[in-house]
Image (cartoon, helix red, strand yellow):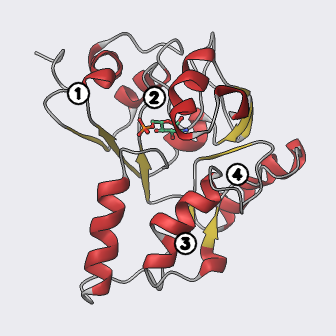
């Protein structure tokens, strides 16, 4: 997962790795999503984010890290991503953040749950939320590739991290709302091994 929420976790993993208490030498990773139109050298691409915040700070083999490619729009290439995950043996642990509108990866509220990795049109709410990281809102890509909801649900274990009041409604709806594609994270109620770690502000609507 990218976003500001997992930054503390990534810093902690890098620290443990530097102290020799953890190794990523045998790990393979698959990221959830990537903006379309940004190549991996763009400082707002998710490939760049992962390299800077985790991969370059631990002993992972760079060739074992996978991020959907957004540099050139290719739906065929995106569809290959699920085959690559399957060929690697599936995902043991999927780390997830949650969007203010309940999105996971870039699976936005919709009238159906998505399946495999695919292209999405970002909602105004997500464009607005993510514009804080760009020079101007016009620079925020309008589309992205994301693992589908089904891809995410195939993971053997899911860890969701959330913090801050802005996530309170989404966290409540994820845990206690109806299971509906209007809140994509609500499908996680049906996963058999999903853990949510959140701060008090994000949990403030969960009584
Ligand atoms: C982005 C990412 C998600 C992330 C979410 C929350 O749009 N595509 O994977 O979970 O926003 O980000 P943050 O942790 O910065 O609130």
Q: Secondary structure at mark 1?
A: loop
Q: Are marks 2 and 4 in contact (CB under 8 Å)?
A: no
User: How far from the left and from the top, in percent, is residue 149?
Assistant: 57, 33
Camera-side residue of 78 and 112: 78
Q: Which mark is residue 202?
A: 1
> Looking at the picture, does residue 64 appear above or below residue 123?
below
Label 4 sits on residue: 82
Camera-side residue of 8 and 179: 8
Label 3 sits on residue: 28
Please report the residue visible at 36 percent of the width from the left and 20 percent of the height from the top. Answer: 170
Q: Is residue 171 visible?
A: no
> Looking at the picture, does residue 66 appear above or below residue 33?
below
Q: Is residue 89 left or right of residue 162?
A: right
Please report the residue visible at 50 percent of the width from the left and 26 percent of the height from the top. Answer: 129
Q: How many marks?
A: 4
Instruction: Assess disc 3: are there few (<14), some (14-19) or many (≥20) residues with their C-alpha within 10 Å of its C-alpha.
Output: some
Q: Is residue 161 visible?
A: yes
> Looking at the picture, does residue 108 appear above or below residue 84?
above
User: How far from the left and from the top, in percent, is residue 177?
Assistant: 33, 11
Q: Are marks 2 and 3 in contact (CB under 8 Å)?
A: no
């Amino acid at each position: 997962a990218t976003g500001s929420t997992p930054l503390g976790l990534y810093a902690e993993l890098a620290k443990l790795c530097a102290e020799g208490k953890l190794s990523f030498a045998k790990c393979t990773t698959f990221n959830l999503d990537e903006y379309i139109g940004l190549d991996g050298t763009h400082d707002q691409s998710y490939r760049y984010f992962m390299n800077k915040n985790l991969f370059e700070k631990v002993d992972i083999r760079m060739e074992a890290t996978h991020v959907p490619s957004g540099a050139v729009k290719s739906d065929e290439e995106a569809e290959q991503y699920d085959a690559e995950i399957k060929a690697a043996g599936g995902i043991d642990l999927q780390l997830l953040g949650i969007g203010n509108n309940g999105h996971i990866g870039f699976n936005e509220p919709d009238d159906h749950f998505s399946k495999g990795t695919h292209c999405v049109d970002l909602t105004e709410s997500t464009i607005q939320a993510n514009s804080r990281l760009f020079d101007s809102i016009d620079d925020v890509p309008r589309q992205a590739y994301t693992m589908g909801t089904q891809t995410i649900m195939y993971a053997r274990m899911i860890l969701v991290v959330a913090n801050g009041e802005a996530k309170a409604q989404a966290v409540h709806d994820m845990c206690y709302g109806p299971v509906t594609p209007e809140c994509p994270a609500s499908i996680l109620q049906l996963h058999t091994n999903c853990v949510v770690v959140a701060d008090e502000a994000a949990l403030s609507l969960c009584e």
